[in-house]
């Protein structure tokens, strides 16, 4: 008999990319490389994110009372390891660190320039 138990994670991993961040695609399809775009949605349990105008796929949409339907291009998710946050100071890709500020709150900061990321 096969063991059909689901492996349950204790907690979702802490991601360094959030919704609304500017990111650069560093790996993947050639047409998407070096694009600086905004993150639309993040899926922490899958380690994936949807980025604006990156990894576009064609989706067949059913007609609804609001729309006609047909084939539309929508962004698909991309793995977080293929994304790098854009430094707010100089606009280059940077790694992200976390530190405690003077108020005792954990904030993200750019490892390249040291600037705090909002």
Image (cartoon, helix red, strand yellow):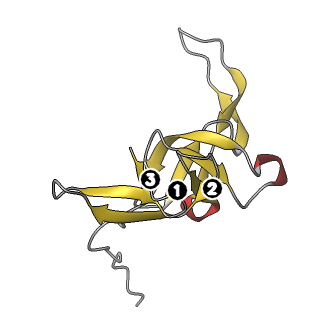
Please tell me which residue is depicted at 59% across the width and 48% down the height of the picture. 23
Quadrant of the snapshot with the C terminus: top left
Please tell me which residue is depicted at 70% across the width and 46% down the height of the picture. 55
Quadrant of the snapshot with the N terminus: bottom left
For marks 3 and 2, give the one nearer the viewer: 3
**In which quadrant of the rendered view does residue 108 lie?**
bottom left
Q: Which residue is mark 3?
A: 115
The numbered mark at residue 63 is none
- Across and down, in percent, residue 86 comes to 58, 49
For marks 1 and 3, give the one nearer the viewer: 3
Question: In what element is the residue under mark 2?
Answer: strand
Question: How far apart are labels 2 and 1 at the CA level?
Answer: 18 Å
Question: How far apart are labels 1 and 3 at the CA level?
Answer: 25 Å
The numbered mark, 1 or 3, whose residue comes first in the sequence reads 1
Q: Which residue is mark 2?
A: 93
From the viewer's perspective, tell me whether residue 78 is left or right of residue 3: right
Q: Which residue is mark 1?
A: 48
Residue placed farthest to the left in the image? 103
Q: Residues within 10 Å of mark 1 (few under 14, many from 20)?
A: many
Residue 8 vertical placement versus 104 (above, below): below
Residue placed farthest to the right in the image? 30
The numbered mark, 2 or 1, whose residue comes first in the sequence reads 1
- Across and down, in percent, residue 17 comes to 46, 54
For marks 2 and 1, give the one nearer the viewer: 2
The numbered mark, 3 or 2, whose residue comes first in the sequence reads 2
Question: In what element is the residue under mark 3?
Answer: loop
From the viewer's perspective, tell me whether residue 31 is left or right of residue 35: right
- Across and down, in percent, residue 29 comes to 79, 55
Please tell me which residue is depicted at 26% across the width and 74% down the height of the picture. 10
Question: How far apart are labels 3 and 2 at the CA level?
Answer: 13 Å
Residue sitting nearer the eye, 98 or 48: 98
Q: Residues within 10 Å of mark 3 (few under 14, many from 20)?
A: few
């Amino acid at each position: 008999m096969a063991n059909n138990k689901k492996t349950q994670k204790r907690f979702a991993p802490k991601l360094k990319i959030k919704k609304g961040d500017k990111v650069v695609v560093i790996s993947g399809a050639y047409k998407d490389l070096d694009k600086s775009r905004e993150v639309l949605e993040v899926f922490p349990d899958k380690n994936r994110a949807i980025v604006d105008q990156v990894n576009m796929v064609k989706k067949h949409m059913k007609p609804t009372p609001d729309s006609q339907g047909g084939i539309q291009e929508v962004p698909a998710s991309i793995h977080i390891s293929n994304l790098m946050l854009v430094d707010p100071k100089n606009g280059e890709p940077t790694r992200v660190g976390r530190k405690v500020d003077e108020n005792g709150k954990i904030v993200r900061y750019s490892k390249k320039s040291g600037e705090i990321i909002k």
